[in-house]
Image (tube, rainbow, N blue to C red):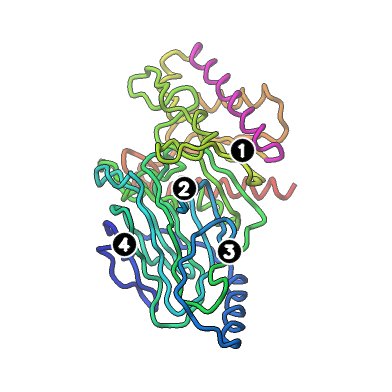
Amino acid sequence: MIAVGCALCIAALGAFTGCSNNKNGSEPVSINTSETTKAVEQTESSTKTGAEAIMQSIPITSDNAKLQSRSVTKDGVLWLVQSGSSAEFTVSGNNASLTLAGSSGIKTDEAHRPRYAVYADDKLICDAVMDKQEETVSLWADTDKTAVIKVMLLSEAQFGGVGIRSVNAESSSAQPVTPTDEASLKIEFIGDSITCAYGVEGKFGDTFSTAAENFTKSYAYLTAKALEADYTTCCYSGYGIVSGFSADGSKNEKDLLPDCYGISSNYADYGTDWDFSEQCDFVVINLGTNDINYVAADTEAHGKEFTNGYKAFLQTVRAKRPDAAIICTVGTMGGDDVYKLIEEAIAELGDEKMTSFFSPSQSPLDDMGTDGHPSKKAQQYIADILTDKIRNLLAK
């Protein structure tokens, strides 16, 4: 069980204070220590000049933080709006805290509110479901300190985002908040609930809750971590290529991932166009699972429709990522027939930088998560396979 809002948070271990740790534990994040060293030197230099430490409230932007995945700045607040969207930066000062903001998602029922995490020097200090319009997370107090802070949205886009209103630091430095370095490798992950890590901390038979959705346990995050890569995401549970999830095989035209690819988020608060300004070396597409029942209802006609739809989406992705290697997969929750259609789509395009692999189906022995979704063990298995695929391509 996780804390609901930081009002229920307790002191973290060590010098950090803030939200209580989730007993399931969000995965530690990789922190770049070179920026910490720079910030220490900057703080020491300021101290030598005898400058007076003052409390500063600093908005987070791409100028003073490394941003991963899609985000939106609105009314001076940086909103983390996709699975794994994060801001990472170094903070120096005597006292430090974060002021976070809740979107309209806080007004929904408790099971569908956005979940976020805060890390300090690779340690999880806050894991909570946002239930307030504004929340303060204390990072440390009454001690001169420099640390790398990372704020991440753990739940997915369609349940709303979490905003960073400001970093508050008592410091004599003119720049107490600085960005960490970007990785040399960047990967885009496009997918459905498997990529979102839907129910990864739940059990088979549980009712879905964002409290059990944790992107740090997704194969996408685990792959990026293994490769020391930065990432960006576009993923929505229940979404497909030509049909979203449909239990009876009827066509669900409402939940289509291609309709969301060009926007920051399909959540009403942040429906802005996405500019695709980030450079991506690889794109991983894990879609087709939610199309399975629709395709099976008429394998010939719907199968052809799926192939054409998948091919059209590949062309869209190629237009946005002209130099990236594109890797397509499906299979963790079934989809042998759909995978053959994916292979056909790739073959018809004849793009040498597009490839595919079938993700082995999860085993019931892997302790399935909510609604039969992959457990952490199954997510790790996908990550291991995908990591090897990318390493092999990098070696060529």
Region in magenta:
300-324
Q: Secondary structure at mark 1?
A: strand
Of labels 4 and 3, earlier in sequence is 4
Q: Which mark is residue 179?
A: 3
Q: Say what amino acid the circle numbered 3 marks.
A: Pro
Closer to us: 170 or 292: 170
Q: Say what amino acid the circle numbered 2 marks.
A: Lys
Please name the residue shown 60% across and 27% down the image. Answer: 343
Occupied quadrant, residue 245: top left
Please name the residue shown 64% across and 37% down the image. Answer: 326
Q: Are marks 2 and 1 in contact (CB under 8 Å)?
A: no
CA gap, disc 4 to disc 3? Answer: 29 Å
Q: Residues within 10 Å of mark 1 (few under 14, many from 20)?
A: some
Q: Are marks 4 and 3 in contact (CB under 8 Å)?
A: no
- The quadrant of the image that shows the N terminus is bottom left
Q: Is residue 157 left or right of residue 51?
A: left
Residue at which label 2 appears: 74
Q: Say what amino acid the circle numbered 1 marks.
A: Ile
Residue at which label 4 appears: 23
- Is label 1 or label 3 in front? 3
Q: Is residue 51 left or right of residue 134?
A: right
Closer to us: 112 or 200: 112
Q: Secondary structure at mark 3?
A: strand
- Is label 4 or label 3 in front? 3
Of labels 1 and 3, earlier in sequence is 3
Residue at which label 1 appears: 327
